Image (cartoon, rainbow, N blue to C red):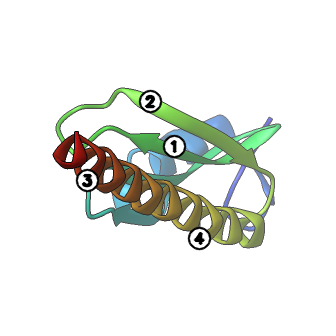
């Protein structure tokens, strides 16, 4: 079964048309300071109507995280949560790196 962004059932032909419409398909896209990309898109297929993925960069589509949602509201909230989580992870990595550098200077 196929669904539009409002969770209304649609036919295969309509789904195919919408799937090729990048403006319709994209829900959110955030590029983090470290270059990682958080992308949330409409998939329109039963049990995975929306999907958020984290990629290494805009040029490297190595998947680092995936989450799926059933509603647009969940997808938007999920996107924000993933951005927050990876932003905090990036900050912690910078702190850890600084501590490591400071420790090397002391030895």
Q: Earlier in the sequence, mark 4 or mark 3?
A: 4
Residue 87 drawn above or below residue 69 = below
Whole-angstrom CA distance, mark 4 to mark 3, is 33 Å
Left or right: residue 91 versus residue 104 is right
Instruction: Check whether the beta carbons of the residues at disc 1 and disc 2 lie within 8 A of each other.
Output: yes
Whole-angstrom CA distance, mark 1 to mark 4, is 12 Å
Please identify the residue farthest to the top as the structure is shown: 62
Q: Which residue is mark 3?
A: 102
Label 2: element kind? strand
Q: Which residue is mark 1?
A: 53
Q: Earlier in the sequence, mark 1 or mark 2?
A: 1
Q: Nearer the viewer, mark 3 or mark 2?
A: 3
Instruction: Check whether the beta carbons of the residues at disc 3 and disc 2 lie within 8 A of each other.
Output: no
In-front residue for pair 86/2: 86
Count of numbered marks:
4
Q: Which residue is mark 4?
A: 80
Q: Which mark is residue 99?
A: none
Q: Residues within 10 Å of mark 4 (few under 14, many from 20)?
A: some
- Quarter of the image that includes the C terminus: top left
Q: Earlier in the sequence, mark 3 or mark 2?
A: 2
Q: Position of residue 90 (x, y in %)?
A: 41, 56
Q: What residue is shown at x 46% (from left), y 44% (from top)?
A: 54
Q: Earlier in the sequence, mark 3 or mark 1?
A: 1
């Amino acid at each position: 079964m196929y669904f539009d962004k409002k969770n209304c059932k649609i036919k295969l032909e309509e789904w195919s048309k919408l799937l090729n419409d990048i403006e319709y398909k994209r829900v959110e896209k955030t590029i983090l300071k470290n270059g990682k990309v958080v992308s949330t898109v409409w998939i329109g297929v039963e049990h995975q109507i929306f999907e958020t993925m984290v990629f290494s960069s805009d040029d490297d589509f190595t998947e680092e995280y995936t989450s799926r949602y059933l509603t647009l509201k969940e997808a938007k909230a999920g996107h924000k949560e993933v951005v927050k989580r990876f932003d905090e992870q990036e900050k912690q990595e910078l702190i850890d790196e600084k501590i490591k550098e400071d420790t090397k200077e002391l030895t």
